Image (cartoon, helix red, strand yellow):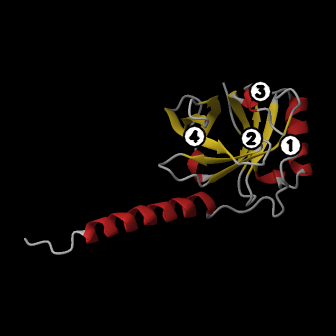
């Protein structure tokens, strides 16, 4: 076979990579109902060193990438290259289900006081927005969203926060403009 146009292979590969990136962007931002049409800007700066470590998901808006997940945790750590390591983990199908984790990385959005990050779980594409909308002064809880209002997470340092704290966190999400009837509480051991 005589190949007269070797450049075509590179063009096809470039189109395939671009198509994958477009599909990934659509998957991240499509489908879910918005629980907040007017997502606020983050309320305060984030001290990254204090924010790092393990978080337990207390509640979330249901989403494709966590469907069926319980005992959800997120671990954040500094990397040598200045990025933030992200390891999300859960038990699929219930507390005794198989363990699943996904590893990614995040970079701080310049000028955001460390309250906005761009997250990537595949390749060089930083398409996920991670906004720390509010957090406790002692970093015992955090409310995380993104600009579309389709995703919301309430994170705590304890797997099972006290009833008063759970109520206060749900009310804080409501005060930020979120439809709290869309929240799904996460089960933990």
Q: Is residue 105 above or below residue 23?
A: above
Q: Nearer the viewer, residue 132 or 93?
A: 132
- Mark 1–mark 3 CB contact (< 8 Å): no
Give the residue drawn at x 61%, y 64%.
30
Q: Estimate the spatial distance between the alpha carbons at disc 4 and disc 2, rounded to whole Å.
A: 22 Å
- Mark 1–mark 4 CB contact (< 8 Å): no
Residue 94 as seen in the image, left or right of residue 176: left
For label 3, the residue is 50
Depth-wise, is mark 4 or mark 2 nearer the camera?
A: 4
- Mark 1–mark 2 CB contact (< 8 Å): yes
Q: Which of the two discs, 1 and 2, labels the residue nearer the N terminus?
A: 2
For label 1, the residue is 170
Quadrant containing the N terminus is: bottom left
Q: Estimate the spatial distance between the alpha carbons at disc 1 and disc 2, rounded to whole Å.
A: 9 Å
Disc 3 crowd, CA 10 A, few/some/many (<14, 14-19, 20+): few
For label 2, the residue is 59
Depth-wise, is mark 1 or mark 3 nearer the camera?
A: 3
Q: Nearer the viewer, residue 51 or 173?
A: 51
Residue 38 seen in this snapshot: yes
Q: Which of the two discs, 4 and 3, labels the residue nearer the N terminus?
A: 3
Residue 62 seen in this snapshot: no
Question: Residue 85's mark?
Answer: none
User: Which secondary structure, mark 1?
Assistant: helix
User: Which secondary structure, mark 4?
Assistant: strand
Question: Residue 105's mark?
Answer: 4
């Amino acid at each position: 076979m005589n190949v007269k146009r070797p450049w075509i292979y590179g063009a096809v590969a470039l189109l395939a990579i671009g198509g994958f990136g477009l599909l990934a962007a659509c998957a991240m931002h499509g489908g879910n109902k918005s629980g907040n049409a007017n997502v606020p800007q983050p309320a305060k700066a984030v001290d990254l060193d204090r924010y790092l470590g393990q978080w337990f998901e207390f509640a979330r808006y249901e989403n494709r990438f966590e469907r069926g997940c319980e005992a959800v945790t997120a671990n954040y750590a500094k990397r040598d290259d200045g990025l933030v390591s992200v390891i999300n983990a859960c038990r699929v199908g219930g507390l005794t289900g198989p363990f699943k984790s996904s590893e990614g990385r995040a970079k701080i959005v310049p000028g955001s006081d460390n309250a906005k990050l761009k997250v990537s779980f595949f390749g060089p594409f930083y398409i996920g927005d991670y906004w720390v909308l509010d957090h406790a002064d002692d970093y015992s809880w955090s409310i995380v969203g993104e600009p579309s209002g389709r995703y919301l997470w309430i994170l705590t340092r304890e797997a099972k926060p006290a009833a008063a704290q759970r109520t206060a966190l749900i009310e804080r999400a409501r005060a930020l403009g979120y439809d709290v009837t869309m929240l799904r509480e996460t089960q933990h051991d």
